[in-house]
Amino acid sequence: MRLEKSTLKDNETIEISGSKSISNRLLILSALFENLTIENLSNAQDTELLDKALKSNAEIIDIHHAGTAMRFLTSYLSIQEGRTTILTGSDRMKQRPIQYLVDALRDLGADISYVEKEGFPPLKILGKKLEKSSVSIPANISSQFISSLMLIGSKLENGLEINLVGKITSRPYLEMTLKILRNIGISTQWEGQMIQIFPNIQTEKSSQIIKCITESDWSSASYYYSLAAIGRKCINLKSFRPHSLQGDSAIKEIYWNFFGVNTISQGSESKISLMPESSFVFPDLISLDMNDCPDIAQTLCVTATALQIPFEITGLSTLKVKETDRLIALKNELFKIGCISEITEDSIYSTKFFEPNQTTFIETYDDHRMAMSFAPFCLIKDLTIENDQVVDKSYPQFWADFAQVLD
Ligand SMILES: O=C(O)C1=C[C@@H](OP(=O)(O)O)[C@@H](O)[C@H](O)C1
Ligand SMILES: C=C(OP(=O)(O)O)C(=O)O
């Protein structure tokens, strides 16, 4: 995608589809419970793949790049009694961790084996009744393992007690899972390192139809915050609620504190306006732990580079095992837009800004968020974004929406 240096239009309105994370949870739950209907489902490729997988009885399911779908289906398929499935994915998926989840499910009685490399997808899963109701799992690699167990917990005869070992990463995603379960009437409890999901007791009430409305995707919204921060003009976004289930709604506070972008709620239409303060004084340094919202780290680094604000972002250990090693990808591509940075196992910090080349070719490493987070830099310089269809993973209409806000 070639992006000529552009200016931002004022007051355009964009509507982003439902949150990918919420949608993927609701799809698993609606496969487990018949009484759910979903509105504003995400049109992300990851969600479509999961939807298709849940509707098919195929012996081989290829989930491509979809991490949440891979992890959620592993637990789901483990309790489909009598069914045998090979669950596989893209080359990158075959390098992304799954072992702690498989170990936990095996401890509960699941029959899962590795088809190729020990500890990684593809998996062969023989669905059966899981007899046990208590399990321990390390919580520092991916919260998706824990959400996956939580989603099936109430279907086990005695519910499920999950003991979280060590530091908890991506915590808001666990809170999201918990709140969604509660919203559909499942009792849960979370105290310290222990999450409990109580068994679902069928009552007349629990068989009533429950309508689940998916709020729009805050991770996708982050790219408009970046545009508003760099371009200093207002952008409106539809279908966002003030109290979100999504941890990435932290973008509101982050972009207010560091870039003076105010989020103004327009009430009944559930529309928000991203309004940059004209007199805002940028900070000398952005210092932030983003362990709670890893998916918006790339967005923030690009905005800070465009505005030449030094940054030190910590809490990013999970970035290494996402669609690509996002820390390495960031360091390489930030350099092309004029930022020298250093990375550690769990952080990235800028060391120097310089004037980049007139045109820049951004590689995306098969990572949708690399494409979308670098795109707003076209407010500063001409850009070419390689392999632009990567955005389909989470936000297929990104380029059309992006073009709408640019002059
Ligand atoms: O549960 C979820 O929907 C997600 C959890 C996070 O992953 P980790 O828990 O692996 O950090 C996040 O990065 C991912 O995009 C979506
Ligand atoms: C990490 C992501 O997704 P997943 O882990 O579901 O592939 C993401 O969308 O940024």
Image (cartoon, helix red, strand yellow):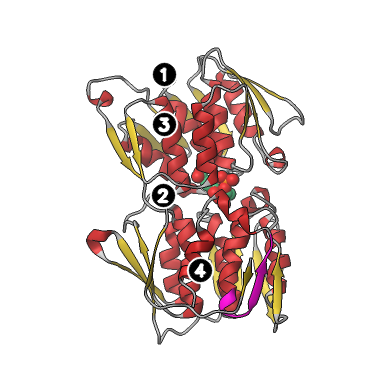
Q: Which residue is drawn at 52% across and 36% down?
A: 50
Q: Is mark 1 within 8 Å of ligand 1?
A: no
Residue bearing the label numbered 3? 29
Residue 363 lies within the magenta run:
no
Contact between marks 2 and 1 (CB within 8 A): the answer is no
Image location (x, y in percent) of residue 127: 56, 17
Part of the protein shown in magenta: 378-386
Q: Distance between the residues labelled 1 and 3?
A: 18 Å
Camera-side residue: 340 or 213? Answer: 213
Mark 2 or mark 3, which is nearer to you?
Answer: 2
Looking at the image, residue 151 lies above or below residue 304 = above
Q: Earlier in the sequence, mark 4 or mark 1?
A: 1
- x then y, percent, for residue 171: 48, 47
Distance from Cα at disc 4 to Cα at disc 3: 36 Å
Mark 4 highlights which residue?
403
Indicate whether residue 383 is drawn in magenta.
Answer: yes
Q: Splitting the image into 4 quarters, where does residue 266 fall? A: bottom left
Marker disc for residue 113: none
Task: Give the amino acid type for the residue marked by disc 3 in the picture.
Answer: Leu
| Mark nearer the N terminus (2 vs 1) | 2
Q: Where is residue 385 in the image (x, y as percent from the top left)?
A: 66, 65
